[in-house]
Image (cartoon, grey):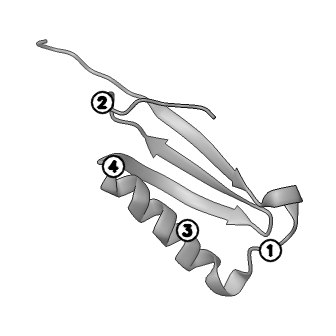
């Protein structure tokens, strides 16, 4: 379809079980990098991946060909 534009942004939050502070600062950047690479492998845009000891936030630009499923 000509002149079609789309913007789909999602904020995802991944929490540690029981919100225990288990994400150590030594390897937090590597974890965020792995999550960002997984998002990019789906041909989506990673805007930011960051977090603290008990959860990680991801802001992504979702392609319209990707279906969102909640479980």
Mark toward the viewer: 3 or 4: 4
Tell me residue 61's x, y (percent). Answer: 41, 40
Circle 3 is placed at which residue position?
32
Tell me residue 6's x, y (percent). Answer: 32, 23
Label 2–label 3 contact, CB within 8 A = no
Per the model, the C-alpha gap separating discs 2 and 3 is 24 Å
Circle 3 crowding by C-alpha within 10 Å: few under 14, some 14–19, many from 20: some
Vertical side of 33 occupied by 63: above or below: above
**Between 39 and 61, the one nearer to me in the picture:** 39
Circle 1 is placed at which residue position?
22
Per the model, the C-alpha gap separating discs 1 and 2 is 34 Å
Per the model, the C-alpha gap separating discs 1 and 3 is 14 Å
Residue at horizontal 41%, vertical 29%?
67
For the image shown, how many numbered marks are present on the structure? 4
Vertical side of 15 occupied by 7: above or below: above
Label 4–label 1 contact, CB within 8 A = no
Mark toward the viewer: 2 or 3: 2
Q: Earlier in the sequence, mark 1 or mark 3?
A: 1
Q: Earlier in the sequence, mark 4 or mark 1?
A: 1
Vertical side of 62 occupied by 29: above or below: below
User: Which quadrant, please, contains the C terminus?
Assistant: top right
Circle 2 is placed at which residue position?
65
Label 4–label 2 contact, CB within 8 A = no
């Amino acid at each position: 379809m000509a002149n079609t534009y789309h913007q789909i942004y999602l904020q995802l939050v991944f929490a540690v079980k029981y919100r225990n502070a288990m994400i150590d600062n030594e390897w937090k950047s590597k974890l965020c990098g792995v999550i960002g690479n997984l998002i990019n492998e789906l041909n989506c845009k990673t805007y930011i991946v960051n977090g603290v000891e008990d959860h990680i936030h991801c802001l992504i630009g979702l392609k319209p060909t990707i279906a969102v499923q909640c479980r």
